[in-house]
Image (spheres, rainbow, N blue to C red):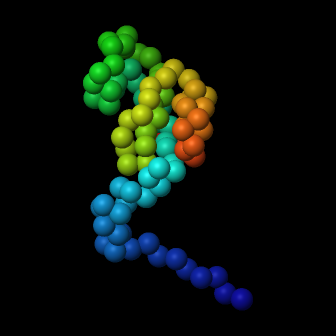
Amino acid sequence: MTEAEVVFEPAGVSIEALATLGEGHIAYVKQIRSEDVPGLFPQAPHIAPGLKLYALHAADGTPIMLTDSREAAIANAWSNELQAVSVH
C-alpha cells in the first residue's frame, strides 16, 4: 500500500471560496492586545493599554465578541453552535 500525496494548489481556490470556508460552522479564538481593540471593535469603549484579551471571529474574519477569558470566547462559540478553533 502506498501513501497518497495531497498537494494544495492555492491558484485553484478563489479568495471568495477561502472566505466562505467554514462559514456558519467554525469560529476562531485569537489572543489580542487591548491596543488592537479599536481596529477590530470600533464600537467598544476605551480599554486600558497592556491588557491580554480574546476575540472570537467568524470563519470569514468578522469579529463576533471580545472578552478577557479564552473560556468565555469558546463558550460563546458553542452557544452559537460554532466549533471554536484557536489561532496563534
- As drawn, the residue found furthest toward the bottom would be 1
Where residue 26 appears, x then y in whole percent? 51, 49
Q: Which residue is nearer to you in this view: 73 or 7? A: 73
Give the residue furthest to the front.
Answer: 80
Tell me if 8 is positioned left or right of 38 in this view.
right
Q: Quadrant of residue 76?
A: top right
Front residue of this view, candidates 87 and 42: 42
Q: 19 above or below 6?
A: above
Give residue 50's quadrant in the image. top left
Q: To which quarter of the image does residue 45 belong?
A: top left
Q: Residue at x 58, y 35 (%)?
A: 79
Q: Position of residue 67 (x, y in %)?
A: 49, 23
Q: Disc count in the image?
A: 0
Residue lying at 60% horizontally and 38% vertically, measured from the top left: 78
Q: Is residue 56 above or below residue 16?
A: above
Q: Is residue 21 above or below residue 83?
A: below
- Does residue 87 appear in the picture of this structure? no
The spot of residue 3 in percent (x, y) is: 64, 82
Q: What is the residue that sits farthest to the right in this orientation?
A: 1
Q: Quadrant of the N terminus?
A: bottom right
Q: Position of residue 31 (x, y in %)?
A: 47, 31
Residue at image coords 38%, 20% = 34
The answer to whether residue 18 shows anywhere in this view is yes
Identify the residue at horizontal 47%, vertical 50% (top origin): 24
Q: Tell me: residue 78, above or below residue 24.
A: above
